[in-house]
Image (tube, helix red, strand yellow):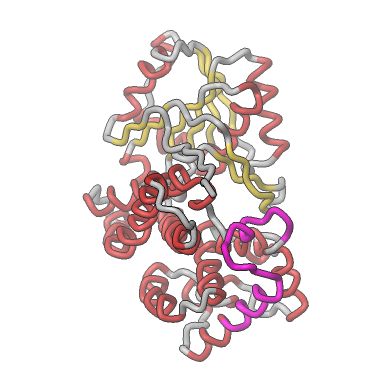
Amino acid sequence: MPLNLIQRIAPQEYLCEENAYEKLADGLKGRFIRRVLFLHGTKSLSKALPYLPDLAREGIESIDVLFNGECSHNEINRIIQIMKENEVDAIIGLGGGKVMDTAKAAAYKAGAYPVILLPTMASNCAAWSPLSVLYSDEGASLGHEIYPHPSSLVLVEPRVILDSPVDYFVAGVADTIAKWYESDFLLTHAGANRLALRFARDAARVCRDIPLQFAEKAIDDMKNGRLSNEWLNVMETNIMAGGLVGGFGDEYGRATAAHSVHDAITSRPETHEFLHGVKVAYGIMVQLVIEEKWDEMKRLVPFYKALQLPLSLADLHLASLSDDELKVIAKETVRPNALIHLHPMNITASKVFDAIVRLEDWAKKNHYAKDTYLS
């Protein structure tokens, strides 16, 4: 049976170099954009401001809008209303993943407006991928939406990202390695050797190999303000390689079990202090238990310890949950339309619950179940 793969590979234009923001005005004018909505967070704007051009001097009107904090339906609708009231030609999203996802969602729903993204952190592949992860106003995951057109322009100023919070960078590394573990089983069982799937697998391998080899040094360089080659490679892997997996692989390069576990545990308020990638890292371990890949889990332990990623429920402040509460999480993990159903195995709620319990036993037996990892 032929595979109906759709490739949404990359932004139309991408630039990562010092002084990249100096290309912004010409990039807008080259797209006949004269009035733009500029969506940003407070902290992200303060970091980026020294490098941003004066758009007004270039004859471009900018409607400044402060992001409310969640990529929710209410926030998306608010941005759409502002876009239409001000008759803008495009939207700029400056900030982290939720800002960029909101910009992409609002641009598409308002009528496929051009999107220009200026990521200020490398915590995920939001700057690369034509999709948005949606949340409730309270921060609970609602799933994701995929859009039929890519962002028009992405400008990465490495010095801004180097000055961003290190914990977001670490979460980005964790989210990136998930691309390998979630797509590995999918691509192995695709049943076809299409060229796009080979590209997806190569990109997924990069998502695993570069972080495992260079992330520790990159994090140390970031803490010390060193714009090293190792840091640049890991930073771009977070932004670019993760997006390429799904861009080439389509449904065979999607997030699956690890992200479904993440989505389920976001319903617990105890986990709201932990970043997306940190919770995904726990989901990777649950997925590997389901797949019976114990050797791979042991291989990952030194990496998890070095980056202070969770290996047990205690590391996410969930050690006190009862079996009934864990069963609610397991049931939420396999809710209808959950990403886990893309996994080739028939994963049920009972299998997820069993995997969580077995992971706890494994962590305790090997002395990994310590709350100190995330202190």
Tell me residue 304's x, y (percent).
42, 71
Residue furthest out toward the top? 59
Left or right: 105, with 205 as reference point: right
The span picked out in magenta is: 335-358
Left or right: 119, with 290 as reference point: left
**91 over 268 or under it: above or below:** above
The residue that appears at 57% across and 63% down in the rendered structure is 344
Task: Classify residue 208 by image quadrant.
Answer: bottom left
Q: Could you tell me if residue 171 is visible in this image?
A: no
Tell me residue 272's x, y (percent).
63, 59
Tell me residue 232's x, y (percent).
28, 48
The residue that appears at 28% across and 30% down in the rendered structure is 19
Residue furthest out toward the left? 229
Q: Could you tell me if residue 248 is visible in this image?
A: yes
Residue furthest out toward the bottom? 365
Residue furthest out toward the front? 1
**Residue 339 lies within the magenta run:** yes
- Judge by depth and name the residue closer to the eye, 317 or 28: 28
- Judge by depth and name the residue closer to the eye, 139 or 191: 191
The residue that appears at 43% across and 8% down in the rendered structure is 59
**4 over 283 or under it: above or below:** above
Left or right: 290, with 54 as reference point: right
Tell me residue 83's x, y (percent).
63, 20
The residue that appears at 27% across and 34% down in the rendered structure is 18
